[in-house]
Every structure is written in structure tokens, then in C-alpha cells.
Image (spheres, rainbow, N blue to C red):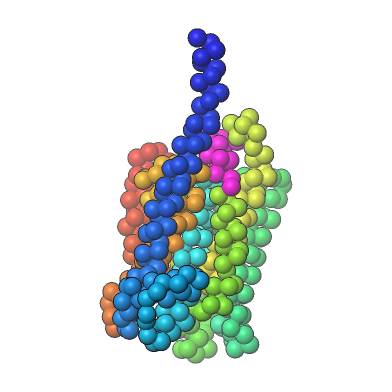
Amino acid sequence: METTSKAVTAGGAPILRSTMYRRLAGWSLALSVLLAGVVIVACAVGPVQIAFADSAAVILDELGFKSGIEYTQRDMLVVRDLRLPRVLVGALVGAALAVSGAAMQALFRNPLAEPGIIGVSSGAAVGATAAIYFEWTAISQWALPSASFIGSLVAISVVYLIASVGGRPSMATLLLVGIGMNASMGAITSVLVANAPDEQQLRGIVFWLQGGLEARTWEHVELVVLPILVGCAFISVFGRDLNVMLLGDEQARSSGVNVPQVRALLLVTASLLAGVAVSVSGIIGFVGLVVPHIVRLVIGPDHRLLVPTSGLLGASFLVAADTIARMAFQPVILRVGVVTALVGGPAFLLLVLRARREGVV
């Protein structure tokens, strides 16, 4: 009996890992198909309607696959040069925010945590607002995303340095300092908005703060694709560590996790990931909050599955939200940040009520 028990125990871990990998492969395939469908639809619909088959054919040809479907030069230009870059930026930003949100919720052990919790978004807002206010955007088209990213980086650094005074920072201290940073950055942004010298600058600041993907180009795709993909992959590697850290620091240490090092690495990576995302899209809320919860309800809390699938669903969610923003109220065009807020606001209230029942908040 003892020998049999040991054999079962010894073989259990590989069996469990094999099951997890099969589930990951299955869900990743399903969500990848969903993402592909959303991308094709998003590239097809608009003021100039394009057949779904032609939209798919252009995308396949751009990827190097020969679709064999003939389409017009107009359709190719609309999809390739106008819609596809915007859609890809939306997918990358959605994936980055969702993965960052999943990591933040695990690190803070709080289901209501999201990427802007430690000042990432508010710091980016100050940087972008300053770039518009001081007309740095006239110097280069990259002034706005660069200033936004630098602002988020400065905010993260200040939060971490203040929280580290007197020793190693706790997550509770980081959260409190982050709240203070958000308030301070929000005040600076309000001052710049209130003193905008003309209506055009005010309009530009407000549009950026609402979040949007208008006028995104292949240069924007090239700017963010590598850091976002690398950041998402890096966080996904630590899925097991996130699972163990949810049980408490002592349990994580006894399982061989270097808690301070892993926590610092993941916190910095998640923050930078969110900073890169908002630098090209503006402030888009609730994606990092809502999407991981949807995945958690359907797939479960295992972060080895949760993190990569959150990225895929986040990409589909933001592309779909942007398509709705463009098409739902024609000729009025909404900002995608407004659509995600309309969806995320009620969802957030439901999450608060659920967390309240479970004693989390």
C-alpha cells in the first residue's frame, strides 16, 4: 500500500502538469481564434465597408500567407494602412493592461487592484499633458508617447523610493503611497488642463485622457510590440510563483520562491508594461480590472492559465470596444476609453459587491 501511494504521489505532479498544459493549449487556441475573428471584423467595418473575406485575405497576405482571394486596391489600402495598425495597437494595449492587471491582483492579493493602482496611469497622464501643454508635440510625433512613458516611469520610481524608506516596502505601503501619488499627479494634470492656453490644446489633453486609438500607424505598432510581448511572456513564466505567493509569504518561501526578488521583478514589469501601453493609447481604464476576473470565473484562479489567457482576452476585448466606439453611434465617434468605462463601471460595482461578500474588502 505504501509503495502504491508513493507511486501515485510521484506520478501526480506530471499528470497535473500535463492536464494544465492541455487546458492552456485548448483555451489559448480558442481565444486566439476569437482574437483573429475580432481583428477581421474590426478591419472590415467602418465608413468604407469591406467584405469579411477580403479583410481576412489582406491580413493573411500581409502575414506572408497567400490567401488566393482577389480584392481591390482600395480594400488593401484601407485595411493595411488605416485599420490594421489601429487594431494591432489596440490588441497589444489590451493584452498589456490585462496581463498587468492579473499580476497586480495577485501581488496585492486584492481582486480590485489594477495597473494604475501605484501611479502608472496618473504619471503617464502628467507626462502626456505636459507634452501637449508645452507644445513638445510640434517637435516630434514621438514626443507624446515618450513623455507619457517617462511620466509613468518617474511615478513608479518615486512610489517605490518613498515606500522603501526605512526598509523593504510592504505591499500595503506601496498601495498607500500609490494612492497619494495618484492624487498628486491628478492635481498637476488638473492645473495644466485649467491653464491650457487655447481650445486646441485643451481638446488634445481631454482626448488623450479619455483614451483612444485614432491615427495609430505601423510606427506605433513597432514602438510597443516588442516590450509588450516580452513583458507579457516574462510575467507568464512566473505563474506558479504567483499561485504560491497568494497563499502568503511564508508558504511561498517554504516552496522555494525568493519572495522579495520575485515581487519586485513582477511589480516593476507589470508597471512598465502598463506604462508602455498607455503611452500610445491614453488612459484606458477597467481592462486590467475586469478582464482577469472574467477569465478567473471561467477558467479558474491558476495563474499559469490566467495570465496568458487574460492577455488574449484583453486583446479581443479592447479591439471589440474600439470597434463599438467607432460604429455604434455613427456619425458620432466615441473614445474607446469611454466605452471601456461604460462596460467596466457596472462590472467594477459587481466585483466590489462580490468581494464584500467574500470578506476581501
Q: Position of residue 86 (x, y in %)?
A: 46, 75
Magenta-drawn stretch contains 244: yes
Magenta stretch: give its range. Answer: 237-250
Decide: is 292 above or below 52: above
| Viewer-side residue, 203 vs 16 | 16
Q: Nearer the viewer, residue 355 or 89?
A: 89
Instruction: Judge whether residue 45 can be spotted in this image.
Output: no
Q: Residue at horizontal 53%, vertical 31%?
A: 14
> Would you place residue 56 above or below residue 117 in this image?
below
Relative vertical location of residue 229 with respect to residue 85 in this rendering, above or below: above
Where residue 121 appears, x then y in whole percent?
Answer: 53, 65
Query: Which residue is painted at 32% across and 83% down in the image?
Result: 47
Quarter holding the C terminus is top left
Q: Does the rendering let one see residue 99?
A: yes
Does residue 338 lie above or below 109 as drawn?
A: below
Give the farthest residue toward the front: 68
Residues 356 and 63: in front is 63
Counting from the top left corner in percent of width and height, residue 235 is at 58, 51
Residue 223 position by quadrant? bottom right
The image quarter in which residue 158 lies:
bottom right
The residue at 69%/50% (across/down) is 164
Q: Does the magenta stretch include residue 19?
A: no
Residue at (48%, 74%) from the top-left corner? 62
Give the x, y percent position of residue 354.
35, 44
Q: In this view, does 3 lie to the left or right of 86?
A: right
Most common secondary structure along the magenta stretch: helix
Image-based side of 228 in relation to 343, left or right: right
Q: How many marks?
A: 0
In the figure, is residue 174 to the left or right of 24?
right
Taking the view exactly as shown, the residue that stands out farthest to the top is 1
